[in-house]
Image: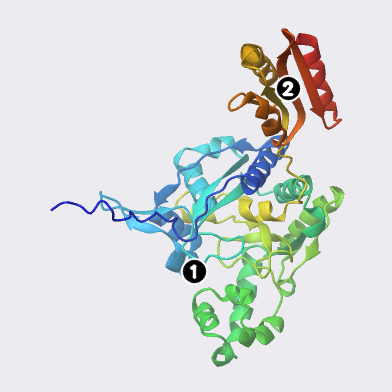
């Protein structure tokens, strides 16, 4: 049977919740990453890479079987060997696993940073995708509040250098030490238990499995009881108070503004002490652009030795969306228009010299020679240099924006023409 050659092949579509990037947004995305790489070097954070795929147990143990991420959002499947594996939904668990399996305890305290794609099966919305990208910074093997403060100062400087300081606020809380947290958790259970039948269905489930997460609820049925619940301050030990005081003192000394949010929590049992979010009202309901906290029990939960650790993560897409319009300059330093093919060799040599000298450059040398200057003029650049021949002699003409870089490009051509 012959195939119908007239049948149209369907055009492949991207997987829902993924995106292709080109041009302005791709440049914004790249600017966020480049700024992060530069700032993490200032703070002495080593670059780390971990696999995009891990045994499912790595995330089930670290995120908790009852969390939405594990129960509803992970991309998990059995590989051909029958092992359950998962595309990473976050960085921290994989870094903690690597810390154990590679013996990185010898480098403690270890400051590491990374960025890359993550995967969660959730409803796509503004700034949130099923394949998304994050920046991540962690300090492993330090129980000092100075580590928490340094990470927060790092995050604050990153946001300032991205031009986001005015639109984003740091909110901060303490979850206390294990003793404080356990006492608060028991008080929360007692408080919410008396209103169990009045709570939302999700909060009723959380009351049995993860009661602190009720504080995250946005359901109107829960708000009265959340607003009236006991706060962590009623249960903080002297040691926990001193730890939080040292963190905030470090922020004050570094000139980092912060606000207390006594309702900010991390629901899993291995979280301790500091919890924080940098929030904005410019992304609708999903207002967190960077968040993290101290997770002193995670590495032990994964089978490693008791290890203090703290870290944060930030969505690259969200940060890119918030960037000021003028933060990314896409212009080239120079464009060369070859108006006479006799000068192509010279123009090509000049192009190579410009690029070797650190100037971003492009050449227009195809199509009608009479139209090349106009074609080159449409390319955003600080300097437009035209090369041609008049009366058998090479000539150049230039059009610049008056910037220092354009002047240097112009001077370069005058010296070699």
Q: Tell me the crowding category of disc 2: few under 14, some 14 to 19, or many 20 or more residues within 10 angstroms, Cα based.
A: many
In the image, 89 versus 237, the foreground residue is: 89
Q: Circle 1 is placed at which residue position?
A: 68
Give me the disc on residue 15.
none
Q: Is residue 65 among what the camera can see?
A: no
Residue 301 in the image, given as x and y percentages of width and height = 48, 56
Residue farthest toward the front in the current orientation of the protein:
391
Residue picked out by circle 2: 386
Q: Nearer the viewer, mark 1 or mark 2?
A: 2
Which residue is nearer to you in this view: 40 or 144?
Answer: 40
Viewer-proximal residue among 6 and 148: 6
Q: Quadrant of the C terminus?
A: top right
Label 2: which secondary element:
strand
- Ranked by sequence position, the earlier of labels 1 and 2 is 1
> On the picture, is 241 further left or further right than 80?
right
- Image position of 124 with respect to 31: above or below: below
Q: Is residue 259 visible?
A: yes
Instruction: State the image coordinates of residue 77 (x, y, percent, origin top left).
Output: 34, 57
The spot of residue 176 in percent (x, y) is: 68, 64
173 displayed left or right of 52: right
Instruction: Identify the residue shown where x is 49% and y is 42%.
Output: 50
The image quarter containing residue 402 is top right
Report the side of 321 relative to 60 (left or right).
Answer: right
Residue at 67% from the left image edge and 81% from the top image edge: 226
Local secondary structure at mark 1: helix
* Residue in the image at 13% along x and 53% along y: 1
Give the number of marks: 2
């Amino acid at each position: 049977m012959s195939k119908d050659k007239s049948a149209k092949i369907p055009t492949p579509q991207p997987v829902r919740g993924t995106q292709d990037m080109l041009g302005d947004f791709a440049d914004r995305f790249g600017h966020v990453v480049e700024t992060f790489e530069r700032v993490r070097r200032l703070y002495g954070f080593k670059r780390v890479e971990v696999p995009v795929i891990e045994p499912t147990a790595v995330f089930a143990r670290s995120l908790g079987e009852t969390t939405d991420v594990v129960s509803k959002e992970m991309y998990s499947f059995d590989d051909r060997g029958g092992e359950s594996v998962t595309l990473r939904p976050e960085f921290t668990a994989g870094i903690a696993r690597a810390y154990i399996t590679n013996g990185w305890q010898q480098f403690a305290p270890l400051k590491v940073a990374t960025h890359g794609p993550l995967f969660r099966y959730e409803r796509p919305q503004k700034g949130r995708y099923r394949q998304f990208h994050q920046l991540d910074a962690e300090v492993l093997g330090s129980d000092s509040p100075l580590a928490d403060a340094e990470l927060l100062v790092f995050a604050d400087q990153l946001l300032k250098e991205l031009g986001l300081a005015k639109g984003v606020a740091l909110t901060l809380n303490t979850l206390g030490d294990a003793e404080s947290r356990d006492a608060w958790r028991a008080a929360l259970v007692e408080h919410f238990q008396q209103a169990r039948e009045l709570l939302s269905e999700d909060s009723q489930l959380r009351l049995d499995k993860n009661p602190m997460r009720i504080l995250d609820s946005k359901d109107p049925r829960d708000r009265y009881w959340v607003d009236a619940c006991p706060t962590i301050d009623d249960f903080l030990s002297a040691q926990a108070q001193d730890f939080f005081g040292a963190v905030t003192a470090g922020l004050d000394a570094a000139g980092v503004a912060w606000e207390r949010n006594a309702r900010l929590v991390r629901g899993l049992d291995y979280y301790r002490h500091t919890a924080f979010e940098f929030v904005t009202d410019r992304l609708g309901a999903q207002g967190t652009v960077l968040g993290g906290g101290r997770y002193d029990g995670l590495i032990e939960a994964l089978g490693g030795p008791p290890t203090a650790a703290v870290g944060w993560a930030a969505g690259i897409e969200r940060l890119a969306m918030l960037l000021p319009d003028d933060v990314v300059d896409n212009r080239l330093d120079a464009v060369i228009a070859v108006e006479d093919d006799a000068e192509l060799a010279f123009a090509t040599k000049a192009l190579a010299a410009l690029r070797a000298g650190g100037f971003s450059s492009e050449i227009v040398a195809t199509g009608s020679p009479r139209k090349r200057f106009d074609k080159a003029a449409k390319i955003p650049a600080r300097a437009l240099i035209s090369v041609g021949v008049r009366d058998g002699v090479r000539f150049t003409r230039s059009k610049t924006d008056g910037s220092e870089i354009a002047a240097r490009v112009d001077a370069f051509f005058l010296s070699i023409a």
